[in-house]
Image: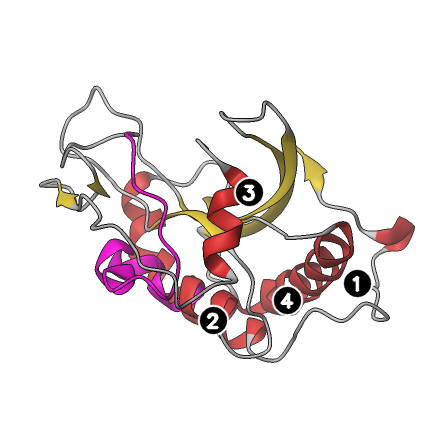
Amino acid sequence: MPDVAEFLGRWNAPDVPRRDARLRRSADGNINTVGLPGIHEADDLDPAHPQWRAAIEEGVWPLVDTLTTGAWRLATYDSCQGHAYSSPSLVPGRRRVGVLPRTRGEFEAAAAALCRSVRAAAPDVPAPVRVVLSSCDLSCGRSGHTYPVLDLGLDPAPGVSTEDYFASVDAATEVLTARLREQWPATDTPCGCVGGGRPARR
């Protein structure tokens, strides 16, 4: 990300003017700055931006909206509804949301709450989809610093075809969204997993 501190500052300052975003849509439904399928640059927006809703792909909107409002109110830095792609040269994309915690305490609380939500959703998620929570580091282009982030993904289960995955991912999203709405980040509430349940690194 070009400037993580500036991005988080905008999330906490809804009255600051926002620049127009460059939103282009590909034939496969990708929303980015160039309107092409695959992974391309996308402007970093926040809920106070006038184009916020238009910048979020339809299939992933329920997850993004839940995680950025209500009891959660987290900052998301990345999202994708998943794309099957008409070109055989492109690898199908999975549905996912990336969360950028503001502090170490928020990271721990969000990770635990997301873990509880994933575990609660698992029995009802359609078999072709599995919900995965992981963590990695986000690099800041301006400062060179890295920030720990959380990735909530709806992945194809092992051996599942692209067709079966995309036929089930909306139903899986509905289940996960419902479980997320039953949870919230709380500093004194562990995830309940053996060993503390820190998300796997990727």
**Marks 1 and 3, how far apart in space?**
28 Å
Residue 191, numbered circle: 1
**Marks 3 and 2, how far apart in space?**
23 Å
Q: Which residue is mark 3?
A: 5
Give the structural element (helix, strand or loop) at label 2: helix
Is residue 98 among what the camera can see? no
Indicate which disc, 4 or 2, sits on the residue closer to the N terminus: 2
Give the structural element (helix, strand or loop) at label 4: helix
Q: Are marks 1 and 4 in contact (CB under 8 Å)?
A: no
Is residue 1 shown left or right of residue 152?
left
Indicate which disc, 1 or 2, sits on the residue closer to the N terminus: 2
Q: Which residue is mark 4?
A: 117
Query: Percent x, y for residue 31?
Result: 21, 45
**Marks 1 and 2, how far apart in space?**
19 Å
Q: Residue at coordinates 83% horizontally, 70% vertically from top-left? A: 189
Q: Is residue 50 magenta?
A: yes
Q: Are marks 3 and 2 in contact (CB under 8 Å)?
A: no
The magenta segment: 40-63
Q: Mark 4 belongs to which amino acid?
A: Ser
Residue 66, numbered circle: 2
Quadrant into which the C terminus falls: top right
Give the structural element (helix, strand or loop) at label 1: loop
